[in-house]
Image (cartoon, rainbow, N blue to C red):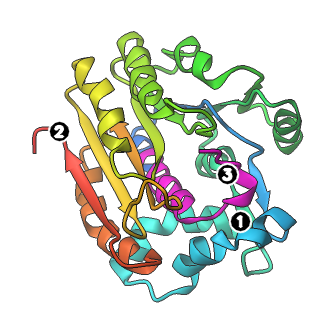
Amino acid sequence: MNYRHAFHAGNFGDVLKHVVVARIVRYMQRKDGAIRVIDTHAGVGLYDLSSDEALRTGEAERGATRVLQGHTPPEIAELIGPWREAVAAENPDGGLLAYPGSPRLVRHLMRPQDRLTAVELHPADGDALRHLFTGDYQVRIVALDGWLALGAFVPPKERRGLVLVDPAFEVGGEAKRLGEGIAESWRKWPTGVYCGWYPIKAGTEGDVVENGLVDAGIAKRLRVELTVRAPAADGPMAGCGLAIVNPPYTLKEELDRLLPWLAETLAEAPGGGFRVTLAGS
């Protein structure tokens, strides 16, 4: 599938990915030491939801807007708080006209000692990313194939951090490549936290990613999936998943509380649902 993000910014996949990334970053910041976030497929960093691309699909209306404008129980509001604050920072006049991609989200969460390496190969997207972070000494923009970056920048000098892998899925075999790519990077930096995003169409994509991690002998794994309709191989994207290596020990319990609410809030058709599975459970 071809996942051009300008058409999909703020959709249910972004909501899941970014809420979870924010939970991971906030957990790692419980210690004073610096962390490094490596975003291997960074995109442009900030998306205009009034653009023709965004308006053509209306996916943000069915994704981030639903979550932000719907009734939020207090315990859920606490869990999505860091993500919601980052989105609000891009929309100071209220509403939802701009949506932060993962590098902008992470930058909003960073402390003075933290650092971000944002990797983007596409020339125009890379230029937009550099413009967005002009003069920001805590952010490094690199023009490189994200799959190469997955192994090139680990371990970081900070020794603690998160590697976010969010490829475009423009060619076949990307799910297999995702699992194997994370596994290869993990061999170089086995104490890092890794979060790989994948779309769900047929419903088996998560198994493909998981197999690459299992074959590498990675024991600490958390599989998180959200579907807004029943998967069908010939249908639209039904959901998305996250393959997380070395997850914070609090994350499963948080997502056990969050995912039922997200699944209900973001449902688009019958047959959707969620899963949160910790390796060995």
- Residue hosting label 3: 101
* Disc 3 packing (10 Å; few <14; some 14–19; many ≥20): many
> Would you say the residues marked 1 and 3 are in contact, meaning their CB atoms lie under 8 Å apart?
no
Q: Secondary structure at mark 1?
A: helix
The numbered disc on residue 279 is 2
Residue 245 image point, x, y percent: 33, 33
Instruction: Compare marks 1 and 3 and give the one earlier in the sequence.
Output: 1
Where is 151 relative to 266, above or below? above
Identity of the amino acid at label 1? Ala
Q: Where the N terminus falls, by quadrant?
A: top right
Say which quarter of the image contains residue 212.
top left
Residue 99 shows in the view: yes
Q: Nearer the viewer, residue 185 or 3?
A: 3
Q: Residue at x 45, y 62 (%)?
A: 238
Tell me the distance, in whole angstroms, between the alpha carbons under discs 1 and 2. 36 Å
Identity of the amino acid at label 2? Ala
Q: Is residue 63 left or right of residue 258?
A: right
Magenta residues span 1-25
Mark whose residue sits in front, 1 or 2:
2
Q: Residue at the left extreme? A: 281
Identity of the amino acid at label 3? Gly
Q: Residue at x 51, y 87 (%)?
A: 70
The numbered disc on residue 89 is 1
